[in-house]
Image (spheres, grey):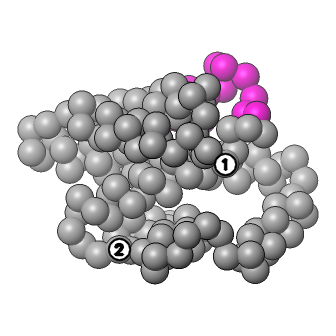
Amino acid sequence: MVIDSRLKSIYDGKSGTDPEHQRLVDQLTASFGPGEAEALVEGACTLVYMYMNWLRTAFEKQEEDVIEHAVPSMVATMRMMPRTFSPEVIPIMAGLLIAAGTGLSPNLWRAQYGPWTKEEMNPLEAMVVLLAEYINRISGNGEDFATRLITDVLSQLD
């Protein structure tokens, strides 16, 4: 829901973060123990995997490669956002996209490089938002298409 909320604020033309929304997010994350924080990061990686899986399928239908098309676009966007994506985190985020785009678990891919750092949390969240926005834009099915992809999958679970 954090990703959906961020997308809605972008589409509403709001710059920055709503202070009240940020306060609520900060309050929620401050209440997390190590297990909940780890689950949140794993959830973000799972979103990356699900979104890249959808993109891979969509590009394969057009006989194109998701890595060739989606990753350079995402990396270019990250480079335009140096306050969110420092040059040091861009290769990590690109690697995460490539892993997911080739069917590998982003969580397992990232584990080989050690634990996530505090400096990588904001870029990870922002990358998921960028990925969802990319899907919304190329799908042509509305500003909430990426969110609907996830809710549809969740509604099919027992």
| Quadrant (top left/top right/bottom left/bottom right) for the N terminus | bottom right
Q: Determine whether, in the image, residue 133 is placed left or right of residue 95.
A: left
Q: Residues within 10 Å of mark 2 (few under 14, many from 20)?
A: some
The quadrant where residue 28 appears:
bottom right
Classify mark 1: helix, strand or loop: helix
Question: Which residue type carries mark 2?
Answer: Glu
Q: Which residue is mark 2?
A: 143
At 68% across and 38% down in the image, what residue appears? Answer: 120
| Residue interval drawn in magenta | 103-117
- How many dots with numbers? 2
Q: Is residue 153 visible?
A: no
Decide if residue 117 is on the left or right side of residue 54.
right
**Residue at 76% of width from left, 46% of height from top?**
38
- Could you tell me if the residues under marks 1 and 2 are in contact, i.e. CB atoms within 8 Å? no
Is 63 above or below relative to 110?
A: below
Quarter of the image holding residue 139? Answer: bottom left
Residue 62 appears left or right of 65: left
Q: Relative to 17, does residue 62 appear above or below in the rendering?
A: above
Nearer to me, 40 or 95: 95
Q: How far apart in space, not on screen, are marks 1 and 2 (Cα)?
A: 22 Å
Q: Residue at x 69, y 45 (%)?
A: 121
Q: Residues within 10 Å of mark 1 (few under 14, many from 20)?
A: few
- Residue under circle 1? 122
Magenta stretch: helix, strand or loop mostly: loop
Residue found at x 21% / y 68%: 140
Numbered circle sitting on residue 94: none
Reply yes or no: does residue 45 show up in magenta.
Answer: no
x and y, in percent, of residue 25 in the image: 76, 68
Q: From the image, which quarter does the C terminus lie in? A: bottom right
Q: Nearer the viewer, residue 23 or 38?
A: 23
Q: Position of residue 70 (x, y in %)?
A: 30, 41
Residue type at numbered disc 1? Asn
